[in-house]
Image (tube, helix red, strand yellow):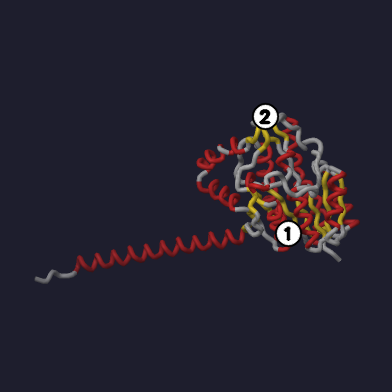
Amino acid sequence: MARVAVVTGGTAGIGLATAHAFARDGWSVGIVARDEGRLRDAEAALRRHGGTVLGISADVADVAAVNAAADRFEAELGPIETWVNNAMSSVVAPTPEITPEEWRRVTETTYLSQVWGTLAALRHMRRRNRGTIVQVSSGLGIRSMPLQVPYCAAKHAVTGFTDGLRSELLHETIDIGLTVVYLPAVNTPQFGWARTRTGAEQDIPAPVFDPRLCADAILFAAHHRRRDIWVGRSTVQMGLMQAVSPAISDRFMARGWDAQIGKPAPDKPGNLFEPAPGPAAIDGRFADKTTHTRSEFFTDRQRDVLVGGLAALCLGGAAALALGAGATRRLSRRRRVLPRVF
C-alpha cells in the first residue's frame, strides 16, 4: 500500500511542486486548497504519475474544515505518513497601513493554519506512534524584513509553536517527527497573488530559487528525520547575519523595502480573502532571475557537525596556547635560577 502525504496549499508554487515530488516518489497524495478549478487541474496533473490523488477544497484557517479534510484523507487514502503545512498569504504594505482584518487574516492563514494542520495530523498519527509533520517556513521566519511584517511575524510564530510541541512529544516519548523547512525567495505565482498597497508590483530580491528545490528538501524531510532544513545559501546567510549581529542585520534588511518595489501598478486585493485567478502552476514570473540548482539545502546535522568541528578547533587552539604559555613560564623560571657563568 502506498504511503500517504498531505500538502496544504497544494495547487500552486511550492505546494504543487511538493505534491508532484511525492507523487513521482510513489506516494498517494492529498492536496488542500480553496479554488475548485485549480484543485481539479492539479489532481489531473498529479494522476499522470500513476498514483492516487485526492483534492479537497477547504480554507486552512477554518479548524473544522482542516479536521474534516484530515478525516477524509485517512478514510479514502489511508494512514497519513507525512503532512506538509505549506499554505500562506501575505500583505505587501507599510505596517501602519495594514488593517486589523488583514493582520488577523495573514495570522490565520500563515500561522494558525499550521497549528490546525499539525493538530489534525497528530490526532491520527498519535494512535500509530509514527509520522512526520513538515512546517514550510521562510528565511523571513529567522529575520524579518520591511513591507511583509505580518507574514514575517507569523513565520516566527510557526517556529515557536513547533519547538514547544516538539519538546512535549519528546516528554511523552511520542515518535512523530517535526521538521521546519526555511525557504529563500522562490519563483512562485504567490508574488502575483499577494495583496499590495505600495502602488507597484511586488518584486523579488535575488537570489531566486526554483520551487522544485524546495520540494526536494520537503521530500527529503519525509524520508530522513531532521529538525531543521535551510534551503538556499541566502537563507543560511540570513541566519548567520542575524545570529552574529542583529543590528547589522537590521540595516541590511532595511534595503529590502526598495528591493520589493517593482514597476508602478495599481494596488491588488490578492488572494488574502478569496482565491486569486490563475492556473495550477508551479512557476511564477521571475524565470530570468531563477537559479536552477537542485541540491542547495542544508540540515541541522550539517550545522551540528560544523559547529562541533569549530568548537573542537577552538578548544584545541586554546589548549595549545595554554600549553605554550605554560612551557614559556617554566623556561622563564629555569632561566632565573641558573647561575651566571663568567
Residue 35 image point, x, y percent: 84, 43
Q: Secondary structure at mark 1?
A: helix
Residue 166 image point, x, y percent: 70, 54
- 253 sits to left or right of 129: left
Q: Nearer the viewer, residue 57 or 177?
A: 57
Q: Nearer the viewer, residue 61 or 262?
A: 262
Q: Secondary structure at mark 2?
A: loop
Query: Given the image, on which type of amino acid does mark 1 rest?
Result: Leu
Which marked residue is nearer to the observer: mark 2 or mark 1?
Answer: 2
Which class describes the residues within 10 Å of circle 2: few (<14), some (14-19), or many (20+)?
some
The structure residue drawn at horizontal position 50% and vertical position 45%, both measured from the top left corner, is 245
The structure residue drawn at horizontal position 73% and vertical position 59%, both measured from the top left corner, is 219
Which residue lies under the disc numbered 2? 199
Q: Indicate the quadrant containing the C terminus: top left, top right, bottom left or bottom right.
A: bottom left
Determine which of the numbered discs, if any, sits on residue 219 in the image: 1
Query: Given the image, on which type of amino acid does mark 2 rest?
Result: Gly
